[in-house]
Image: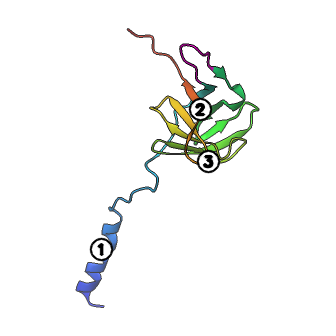
Amino acid sequence: MTMKRALILAVGVLGLGGVAQAVPGGQLMVLPKGGWTCEIPGDAAVTPVAKPELSFETIADSSYVAPDGSRGSYLRLADRLTLTSGVFSGRRFLMDGEEILRELGTDDTPTGLRCVHAGPLSLTV
């Protein structure tokens, strides 16, 4: 191989490191840490129905703690969340902003369940 050809190959290989590749499914992200209270939402005429058995707490390392104290992990890609291990493995959600999750069924239709992040309140005026 000639020196010129070797130089072109080296520059090409080094250039590959700077090429950004899209992540299939969207940007890898994490959820805010803290409790997520799940419920069937209500409206002006119907009181919300709490579902504490489906609630969870997000902790470090893309992990969660279920109500029974067991741990699992999750994967968040952009506005999609999948609980990937633990007792809630397979549950999927669509993010509605950063503080509300809406659960999806196996056919991607909403199940009617929402989980709201119970983070710290800002009381500044």
For the residues marked 1 and 2, what is the alpha-carbon distance in whole angstroms? 51 Å
Q: Name the amino acid type tagged 1.
A: Gly
Q: Quadrant of the C terminus?
A: top left
x and y percent of residue 77 in the render? 48, 47
Residue drawn at 43 percent across, 48 percent down:
27
Q: Secondary structure at mark 1?
A: helix
Say which label, 3 or 2, has the lower sequence index: 3
Q: Classify the position of the N terminus by image quarter.
A: bottom left
Asked which quadrant contains residue 33, the reply is: top right
Instruction: Describe the colour scheme in one phrase.
Output: rainbow
Q: Circle 1 sits on which residue?
A: 12
Q: Which mark is residue 99?
A: none
Q: Is residue 42 above or below residue 61?
A: above
How far across and how far down the image is residue 79, in percent?
46, 41
Q: Toward which corner of the image does residue 109 lie, by quadrant? A: top right
Which residues are the magenta region?
41-48
Q: Which is more toward the observer, 3 or 76?
A: 76
Label located before the other in sequence (1 or 2): 1
What amino acid type should be assigned to the residue bearing mark 3?
A: Thr
Q: Quick one: 32 or 90, which is closer to the camera?
A: 90
Question: Which residue is at 53% across, 13% downward?
Answer: 44
Of the pair 45 and 61, the residue shown nearer to us: 45
Query: In the image, is 62 to the left or to the right of 18?
Result: right
Q: CA distance from mark 3 to mark 2?
A: 13 Å
Tell me the quarter of the picture where residue 70 sits.
Answer: top right
Residue farthest toward the top in the current orientation of the protein: 125
What numbered label is drawn on residue 106? Answer: 3
**What kind of secondary structure does the magenta stretch mostly adopt?**
loop
Select label 1 or label 3 by which is in front: 3
> Which residue bears the numbered disc 2?
112
